[in-house]
Image: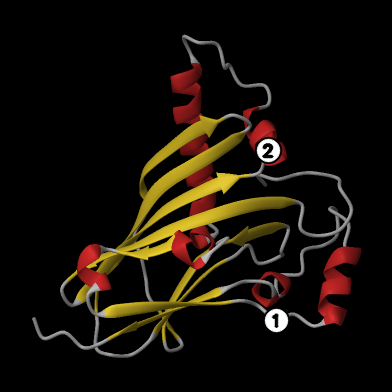
Amino acid sequence: MLFPFTVQAHPHSWIDLKTEIEGSQNQITGLKMSWTFDAMTSAYMLDGEDLSTENKAKTMQKVAASVMQNMIAEHYFTYFYDGETPIKYSLARRGVLTQNRTKLTLDFVLPLSKPKILDGNPLKLLIFEPSYYVDMSWQKKGDIQLSPDLAKHCSLELIEPKPTSEQMSYAMSLPADADPDNALGQLFTQTVLITCSENKG
């Protein structure tokens, strides 16, 4: 677990997302991610690590590799669909961790296992931690971008979640050590709807 805090109420950690949907002509090839962790989570991730000037770069590489490895079992918290059919991806690559003041940012690329040919069907992208221990969100629509080629014939819509007051109260009542409710995260997650005109070129 990357985020073991003992604060009351979910969520306990926050990640600001930036995503570029990569591709060209009539296909999507992958997702370029930039995730910025809140200050408390960032401090925890570096707790006990050697941050001396001569070793900091190596430490950041080690922590990045550890986070990337841990996310494999969680499917990188990323859910990409064509209708109800999941779009599969390969192992993430180019994981780089950087620090800006009190916050860490993890950049990586998540390639699709094979290019997704655009046939006019809308696609859905969600990024969330299932138990809502961690809040993962795009702060504004501009935090999701299309590659220049895709932008010529695709559009994006950022749909905000609409949890009920009862669902919000339930999440707020959960302590950090509660058994995970893996249905919770999806209630609070945004959805990116990607619509592309069919491109024969």
Q: Secondary structure at mark 1?
A: loop
Q: Residue at x 82, y 62 (%)?
A: 179
Tell me if mark 2 has few (under 14), some (14-19) or many (20+) residues whose alpha carbon lies within 10 angstroms of its own: some
Q: Residue 48's image quarter?
A: top right
137 relative position to 201: left or right: right
Q: Position of residue 113 (x, y in %)?
A: 29, 66
Q: Between residues 52 and 138, which one lies in front from this camera angle?
A: 138
Q: Position of residue 96 (x, y in %)?
A: 41, 37
Spatial separation of the CA atoms under disc 1 and disc 2: 27 Å
Asked if the residue at tag 2 contacts the one at tag 1, i.e. Cβ–Cβ closer than 8 Å, the answer is no
Name the colour scheme.
secondary structure
Q: Amino acid at mark 1?
A: Lys
Q: Residue at x 42, y 45 (%)?
A: 107
Tell me if mark 1 has few (under 14), some (14-19) or many (20+) residues whose alpha carbon lies within 10 angstroms of its own: few
Which label was assigned to residue 182?
Answer: none
For the C terminus, which image quadrant?
Answer: bottom left
179 relative position to 140: left or right: right
Q: Position of residue 118 (x, y in %)?
A: 24, 82
Which residue is under mark 2? 39
Q: Position of residue 28 (x, y in %)?
A: 26, 71
Q: Between residues 119 and 195, which one lies in front from this camera angle?
A: 195
Q: Count of labels shown? A: 2
Residue 115 seen in the current view: no
Which residue is under mark 1? 162
Q: Residue 45's image quarter?
A: top right
In the rendered view, would you say 111 is above or below 65?
below
Q: Secondary structure at mark 2?
A: helix
Q: Residue at x 82, y 73 (%)?
A: 168
Q: Amino acid at mark 2?
A: Ala
Q: Residue at x 42, y 89 (%)?
A: 83
